[in-house]
Image (spheres, grey):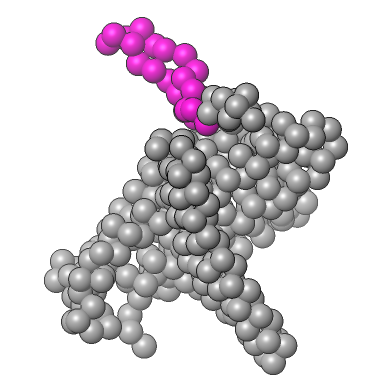
Amino acid sequence: MSIGIIAAGIAVLTGVGAGVGIGIATGKASEAIARQPEASGKINSALLLGCALAEGTAIFGFITALLIIFMG
Amino acid sequence: MEAFKQFLLEELENKTAFTLDWFGGIAISQAVVVTWIIMAIWMVITLFVTRNLKVRNPGKLQVALESCVTFLNGFVKDNIGEHWRSFAPYLGTVALYIGLSNVIGIFGLTPPTKNINVTAALALMSMVLIYGAQFRYNGLLGGMKRFAEPMALLVPINLMEVAIRPLALCMRLFGNVLGAFIIMEMLKYLVPAVLPAVFSLYFDLFDGLIQTVVFVFLTTLFAGEGIRKEE
């Protein structure tokens, strides 16, 4: 079980990638809105899509960790 | 710690609410019962809101309702294009259902979206919508050709997406709701008063609504991608 806990911890490291990705995307989006405030609607929807896809990896890591802890 | 783990394991199970006696016992899970409650709530709201609709001098409620419907229609129109009309009702219904079922944790009921079977069913329905629309509006051959866009080299990846898109939709919704649920249970176990209320505002309300938007938005976008004409 102790090895399993370490494996779950490693699986949750996927959150790093998602965090960096969403951070960069949000930063760029606010830059783009500052430059072109009239396009904010389109920028927001593109940002939402990107964030949802980036967040997916973190969720997969989280589910993998849960599977390891509770099923393994 | 062991006691908490045991408690969490019990909370994570998909509980059976009651069992029907027909055909040797049909188990009705809690998610189904909560779904019935949600359906009843929306039915009552719908009946209440659509009473006394007028063309002249609409009341405040009617104006609010009309602006909601206009917002939904505009959103679907922007993302799908000319064939938007037949998609708007389904997407609005899914948004209402997922929205209320994510938020219903506040009232002490178990959110149905915590059960992976519910999110899997929703994702399968989205998949049928996306690829059904692709074949419906392009014809059989045109629909097949859509898999070879933007170039023929990408056919395997596009075919893989048929399975990956619903899987990602299902897991995203399920993982978010489950994660929020576990964090809230941990908080309640450690600090039983005050603090959970503050965090519940973020985890139950904000996160749930964001996930609703994401699910509906992704379904709309994928459906629009399949049927939109190249400009």
Residue positioned 49% across, 56% down in the render: A10
Residue B97 appears anywhere in the view: no
Counting from the top left corner in percent of width and height, residue A66 is at: 48, 43
Residue positioned 36% across, 60% down in the render: B165
Q: Please, is residue B162 above or below residue B31 in the view? A: below
In the image, A58: left or right of B24?
right
Q: Please, is residue B97 above or below residue B81 in the view? A: above
Q: Please, is residue B204 above or below residue B142 in the view? A: above
Please tell me which residue lies in front, A9 or B174: A9
Please tell me which residue lies in front, B157 or B66: B157
Counting from the top left corner in percent of width and height, residue B121 is at: 38, 42
Q: Say which quarter of the image contains residue B28.
A: top left
In the image, A27: left or right of B86?
right
Please tell me which residue lies in front, B226 or B211: B211
Residue positioned 53% across, 69% down in the render: A17
Q: Say which quarter of the image contains residue B110.
A: top right
In the image, B46: left or right of B169?
right
Q: Quadrant of the C terminus of chain B?
A: bottom left
- Tell me if residue B17 is in the magenta stretch: yes
Residue B152 appears anywhere in the view: yes
In the image, B62: left or right of B84?
right
> Extreme front residue here?
A2
Please tell me which residue lies in front, B206 or B221: B206
Residue positioned 37% across, 65% down in the render: B223
> Extreme bottom residue here?
A35
The residue stretch that appears in magenta:
B12-33
